[in-house]
Image (cartoon, rainbow, N blue to C red):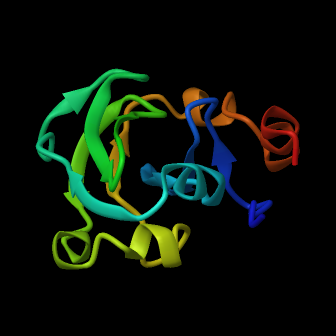
Amino acid sequence: MNIPANLKYTKDHEWVSLEGDVATVGITDFAQKELGDIVYVEVETVDQTLVQDEVFGTVEAVKTVSDLFLPVAGEIIEFNEGLETEPELVNTDPYQAGWMIKVKVSDAAQFDALLTADQYKELIGA
């Protein structure tokens, strides 16, 4: 299982990277394996400011639909439009091409409080 050490994680299986005040968010390798084949990613919250843990979109797999929770409060400034035509990128490359949104972070302390890779591994029993 791929759990990059340079990222932060949530108990809801999102990953986060931070460059300056912009966070990139996606779902973890563990989450995409649990969901199975991703067929659709819906994010209708671009240009909205949301609080931490608010639902920012949904991911649809063959057998289920799952909410996506915002790991850090801020304004959603970008959606990965490549997922509109190739949602399977979430399965094949969850940490690079399969990223979902970019967020202008309003509270960097929230990022610091997220799980480390080791804490996330412990959470999922990896």
Q: Residue at x 68, y 55 (%)?
A: 7
Q: Residue at x 40, y 76 (%)?
A: 89
- Marker count (numbered): 0
Image x and y of residue 61, in percent = 35, 54
Above or below, 73 relative to 85: above
Above or below, 83 relative to 17: below
Image x and y of residue 85, in percent = 17, 78
In this picture, residue 32 sits left or right of residue 65: right
47 vs 32, nearest the viewer: 32
In this picture, residue 110 sits left or right of residue 116: left
Q: Where, by quadrant of the figure, is residue 11 drawn?
A: top right
Image x and y of residue 88, in percent = 37, 73
Q: In this view, which residue lies farthest toward the front? A: 63
Q: Where, by quadrant of the figure, is residue 106 drawn?
A: top left
Q: Residue at x 32, y 34 (%)?
A: 74
Image x and y of residue 23, in percent = 45, 52
Q: Which quadrant of the rendered structure holds the N terminus? A: bottom right
Residue 43 in view (yes/no) = yes
Q: Residue at x 47, y 28 (%)?
A: 107
Above or below, 94 relative to 12: below
